[in-house]
Amino acid sequence: MLLRFTKMHGLGNDFMVLDLVSQHAHIQPKNAKQWGDRHTGVGFDQLLLVEPPSNPDVDFRYRIFNADGSEVEQCGNGARCFARFVLDKRLTVKKQIRVETKGGIIELNVRADGQISVDMGPPRLEPAQIPFQADQQALSYCVEVEGQAVELAAVSMGNPHAVLRVDSVDDAPVHSLGAKLEHHPRFPQRVNVGFLQVIDRQRARLRVWERGAGETQACGTGACAAAVAAIRQGWMDSPVQLELPGGKLSIEWAGPGQPVMMTGPAMRVYEGQVRL
């Protein structure tokens, strides 16, 4: 069976997108792992599935698999690509699209300039909701990694994030410390790890180690989590401009209980077919 797919990217965070509204197939983790291999498959950070909604109040269901086959709750850069995809494929004519994800309902807004804004919903800061093992909520936490004390913020944007402030992202131990924190026992569902370099009150640089994918060119939910952590701790003011290796994202957040708004581009790379 051949399936049509589209290769897309949001700031270099790349995706294979499958329309399972007009095509019918049962996708398994092993398929994502096979297709995600950059040498023998299509190659991507995440596989995005566009499915019919199970909830009458939303337009689509959105599922995400990492290249290692693990299914995750949310992907912000993927959400922008999702919006561009369903419009390009004429699966909808709406410019405001409600989508259900494993991490909750999000709203996608396609702007006149082609940029896409995503209402990511309010961040979750209670340890149990992240999930993160801690006695009570705090602005930051001390986590021990192989005898080293690491100070980090813990935030969920529908998926768990740890945010560390560093002097320079160029010198940050993204691969070594990111991999260790991803599997730290205090994060029972693993964690994405952001390394944040604050430049001024509204500009910062960010690198993200994503669980199941390693370092990516950009991470939308990671950018949201980093902005929330920086605003909460008084380092920065909304709106925040974050520079990632793949490009820039604008993040707005008015404070606790308020939704995080993320704005950035989404690009189509090519169309193809893959055998299931």
Image (cartoon, grey):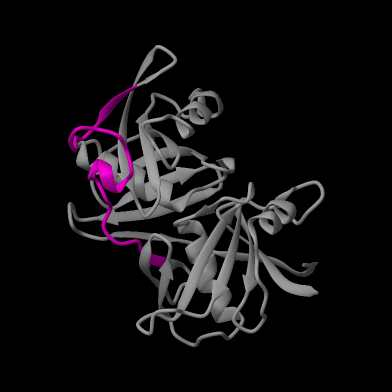
Predominant secondary structure, magenta span: loop
Residue 198 showing in the rendered view? no
Q: Quadrant of the N terminus?
A: bottom right
> How many labels sit on residues?
0
Residue 136 showing in the rendered view? yes
Q: Quadrant of the C terminus?
A: bottom right
The percent position of residue 51, horizontal first and vertical second, equals 54, 75
Q: Which residues are magenta?
A: 117-143
For the point 44% across and 85% down, which residue is it? Answer: 94
For the point 40% across and 61% down, which residue is it? Answer: 263
Q: Nearer the viewer, residue 162 or 11?
A: 162
Q: Is residue 207 magenta?
A: no
The percent position of residue 240, horizontal first and vertical second, equals 32, 49
Residue 93 horizontal side relative to residue 142, left or right: right
For the point 44% across and 68% down, which residue is it? Answer: 116
Q: Quadrant of residue 232?
A: top left
Q: Nearer the viewer, residue 40 or 263?
A: 40
The percent position of residue 127, horizontal first and vertical second, equals 26, 41
